[in-house]
Amino acid sequence: MAKNFDIKRSMNKDLVYGGLLELSRNKLVWHESTVSPEYSHLTEDGQKAIIHVVENMFRGLQTIHNQEVKDEAKRQTLEALK
C-alpha cells in the first residue's frame, strides 16, 4: 500500500509542477519583464489561477493523507487480531 501512495504523492507533485510551469508561460497569468525578473509578476487572473492550483494541491494531499491514515488503522487492527 505504501508504494501506491508514494506514486500518488509523486504524481501530485508532478501535477503541481506541470500546472505552475504552464501558468508561468501564459501571458494572461504571468507578466514576464524583459528588463529584470524582479519586475515580473502575476496578473490578477494569475493570482486567481495560483490560488486554484494550490487549493487543488491541498485537496490531493488531504486525500492521500486520509487514505494513509485509514490504511494504517486497518493494518494495526489486523495486526492486533493475530
Image (cartoon, rainbow, N blue to C red):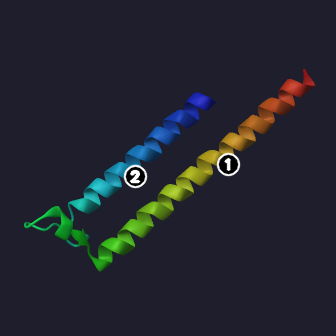
Q: Tell me the element at label 1.
A: helix
Residue at horizontal 91%, vertical 25%?
81
- Image coords of residue 55 (percent x, y): 49, 64
- Residue extending farthest to the left is 34
Tell me the tag on residue 66: 1
- Image coords of residue 27 (percent x, y): 18, 69
Residue at horizontal 50%, vertical 35%?
7
User: Compared with residue 8, is residue 25 higher up or lower down, i.e. above or below?
Assistant: below
Q: Tell me the element at label 2.
A: helix
Q: Looking at the rendering, in which quadrant would you find the C terminus?
A: top right
- Residue extending farthest to the bottom is 44
User: Compared with residue 30, is residue 8 higher up or lower down, i.e. above or below?
Assistant: above
- Image coords of residue 3 (percent x, y): 56, 29
Count of residue discs: 2
Quadrant of residue 35 in the image? bottom left
Q: Nearer the viewer, residue 54 or 36?
A: 36
Residue corresponding to mark 2 = 16
- Residue extending farthest to the right is 81
